[in-house]
Amino acid sequence: MKKRLAAGLISVLCFLTLSGCAPRQQELQAALVLGFSQLGSESSFRIGNTRDIEDKAKRYGVSLMMDDANQKQENQIKAIRRFIAYRVDVIAFSPIVEEGWDNVLTEAKQAGIPVILVDRTIQTSDRELFVSQIGADFYEEGVMAAEYLLKKADDLGKDQLRLVEITGTENSTPMKQRHEGFMDTIAKDDRMVLLESVNGDFLRSRGAECMRYLLDRYGDEIDVVFSHNDEMTMGALPEIEKLGYRPGKDMVIISIDGGQEAIDILREGKINCIVECTPMLGSILMETALALKAGQSIDHEIHPEERVFSDYDDLSALPPRGY
Ligand code: AHR
């Protein structure tokens, strides 16, 4: 184990030297070397997640090698290979999509480096390729979004509600599971009619594009917009307003994440409901990585607790969200 730590520290020194940074005393004494591949910076969730992991690494005395994959799976695979070559103690990454990880994770397994998935999960026939997934229960998020809608439908007293859905990145865990959780829950209710589901890639600009398309195609048929993240919702809202509709009143707006900007818009009444998806996973990640290094057993899935914010709640005392 000592050998591994020494090798890991030498690797970090090389990495820091290559990237032009002199190692600080804290890095030399790090309890653990963690390689983390972040998938990108597409949303306030993601930026908050990166910041939280960096902050918590410092707090826990973990030496962090952070890599930003710029929304490309191939960059994540390259980063994981670099971490293996550096012989870090633990590899963690947020997989942009679910498929296509078996080869690189088999290489990590052969090198004896444990892997933790952060935020999203993967499809693999070998459950041993990763030790744990730390992230939201995305299916449950879809269920919570739909449960809000069923309650709202009762209060609105309408016979029918026509919905559009703007989903996140194709083949990503949140996109698949939020859709399934939501659809499974509304399927039991005859009032709900899905007009169309379109892909907005979790980006604000794509949220705007998708909304323009949906308004053009369905106009005032749309009663409900279910958007898979705040970023796309905030892209969609101005498009709705441009055509003279009042989001939150003429259309029920349901979003996911719960970043500060979206919560402020919910308070203004232009979003009706936000299901929380917390990016604050840094402490659990550091504790899990340290426990792994200490040889303790780890749960295969670790989900943070999440809640719903909606126009049924008094949010005046809600503390700043931090992302
Ligand atoms: O994987 C979590 C999702 O990814 C968040 O809901 C979204 O904002 C982010 O891009």
Image (cartoon, rainbow, N blue to C red):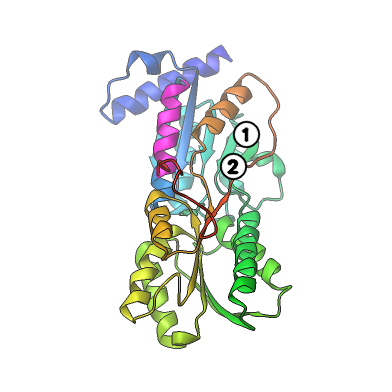
Q: Amino acid at mark 2?
A: Leu
- In this picture, is 311 found above or below 163? above
Which residue is at 33% across, 71% downward?
A: 238
Tag count in the figure? 2
Q: Which residue is mark 1?
A: 110
Q: Is residue 58 magenta?
A: yes
Name the side, left or right, on which 142 lies relative to 199. Answer: right
Instruction: Identify which residue, 192 or 111, lies in the foreground.
Output: 192
Circle 1 Cα neighbour tier, 10 Å, few/some/many (<14 / 14–19 / ≥20): few
N-term mark: 1 or 2: 2
The residue stretch that appears in magenta? 48-60
Give SS at disc 2. helix
Give SS at disc 1. helix
Can residue 209 be seen by looking at this rendering?
Answer: yes
Which quadrant of the view contains residue 30? top left
Per the model, the C-alpha gap separating discs 1 and 2 is 9 Å
Which residue is at 28% across, 21% downward?
A: 22
Q: Quadrant of the N terminus?
A: top right
Q: Is residue 175 magenta?
A: no
Can residue 69 be seen by looking at this rendering?
Answer: no
Q: Residue furthest right?
A: 188
Circle 2 Cα neighbour tier, 10 Å, few/some/many (<14 / 14–19 / ≥20): many
Q: List x then y, in percent, for residue 268.
A: 38, 61
- In this picture, is 57 found above or below 181? above
- In this picture, is 166 found above or below 162? above
Q: Does the Cβ of the disc 2 residue fall within 8 Å of ligand 1?
A: no
Q: Which residue is mark 2?
A: 105
